[in-house]
Image (spheres, rainbow, N blue to C red):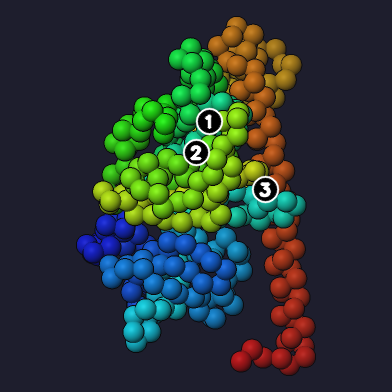
Amino acid sequence: MSPVNDQLKQFGWDEWLAEKAESNGLTEYRLARVVAVDRDQLLVLNESGEFRAKLAGRFLYMTENPSDLPCVGDWVRVQYSGSDDFGIIHDVVPRKSFLRRKAAGDAIEYQMIASNIDVALIVQSCQFDFNTNRLERYLVMVRNGHVHPVVLLTKTDLVSATTLQQLIEEIRGAGITAEVIALSTITGEGVNDVQTILQPGKTYTLLGSSGVGKSTLINRLIGRHILETKMVSGTGEGRHTTVRRELIVLDNGAMLIDTPGMREFGMLGAEEGIGSSFADIYELALQCRFGDCSHSNEPGCAVLGAIEEGSLHKAHFQNFLKLKSESEFHDLSYLEKRNKDKAFGRYIKSVKKDMGIRRT
């Protein structure tokens, strides 16, 4: 078993990562964790502090997929300059967990959000932002990356206790079993519950739409204003403030990754996350009369039966169908694209060979 660097444990380094680094031959040079990514430069952190680094030319040349480039939370192998205030990144240590989505727009590619995360705090406002379908989408993404989810319902000061209880019941009615914490950064209600979750040496991330109060919550947890926040509208809807992903080390040693609000996040390669988030539907499907039941109109369908008797919410099932169909469509498109890219790469190599071109 590979020894664990005790000085790096405070930043999340553990036995799993150490073994992966050793088995992949990544023990040469020192290790550091990515704190932020600014175009062609990265801010990284090790036992000596924060410093700037850039990607080695060979690493860039050998990397085919953008999702394989370093993202916030990654551990990287760094060669330092003589002054130790700048480094060259040669490799990324395999990720223990990750958050990724389909790239925005028409591109059929993965976009990395963050990596090596222990807990994702999924933030929804009790007022304008609350949406169980969106919450289920977040949960699929989180569980697909082997990250533990916790749901935060913010701005409880803007709704009545009855309304808050109805929102929680709606979450449970959708089959969502994740822990739910209701809080208000104005009254302080629930903030201590969030602080209790944050443990030294563990990494957390805040996920949610713009304006749900992520930056305000971080400032409350830190006890000082290091992230810019803006005034909210009369409806309680906040304005987007976070412009980049950034890892922040809290005073108690926990690490928190703030992320910009995501307007869209498509499903790609999310089969495992869908299976975990909609386990109730998969379990019901085992009871269907026919093994290939499509749960549309077949006799003896346990899923349709559960909907009819009210033990399974129709909206929950419809969202399952939507996310599953979306993921399968994008997965097929991604596979076709990768096959075309590989075929084109082989063609270029053959042309170079015929022309007598050799890489120097």
Q: Nearer the viewer, residue 54 or 310?
A: 54
Cα distance between the residues tagged 3 and 1 = 31 Å
Point out which mark residue 125 bears: 1
**Residue at 50% from the left image edge and 61% from the top image edge:** 71
Mark 3–mark 2 contact, CB under 8 Å? no
Can you name the residue that lies furthest to the top here?
Answer: 309
CA neighbours of label 1 inside 10 A, class few (<14), some (14 to 19), many (20+): many
> In the rendered structure, which disc, 3 or 1, sits on the residue that comes first in sequence?
1
CA neighbours of label 2 inside 10 A, class few (<14), some (14 to 19), many (20+): many
**Residue at 26% from the left image edge and 48% from the top image edge:** 252
Report the amino acid beneath label 3: Asp
Give the quadrant of residue 264: top right
**Residue at 32% from the left image edge and 42% from the top image edge:** 198
> In the rendered structure, which disc, 2 or 1, sits on the residue that comes first in sequence?
1
Report the amino acid beneath label 2: Gly
- x then y, percent, for residue 77: 40, 72
Cα distance between the residues tagged 3 and 2 = 33 Å
Helix, strand or loop status at disc 2: loop
Residue where numbered disc 2 is placed: 213
Helix, strand or loop status at disc 3: helix
Mark 2–mark 1 contact, CB under 8 Å? yes
Q: Is residue 199 above or below residue 325?
A: below
If the image is split into quadrants, where does the C terminus sit? Answer: bottom right
Cα distance between the residues tagged 2 and 1 = 8 Å
If the image is split into quadrants, where does the N terminus sit? Answer: bottom left
Residue where numbered disc 3 is placed: 331
Report the amino acid beneath label 1: Ser
Give the quadrant of residue 239: top right
Q: Can residue 229 be spotted in the picture?
A: yes
Left or right relative to 233: residue 78: left
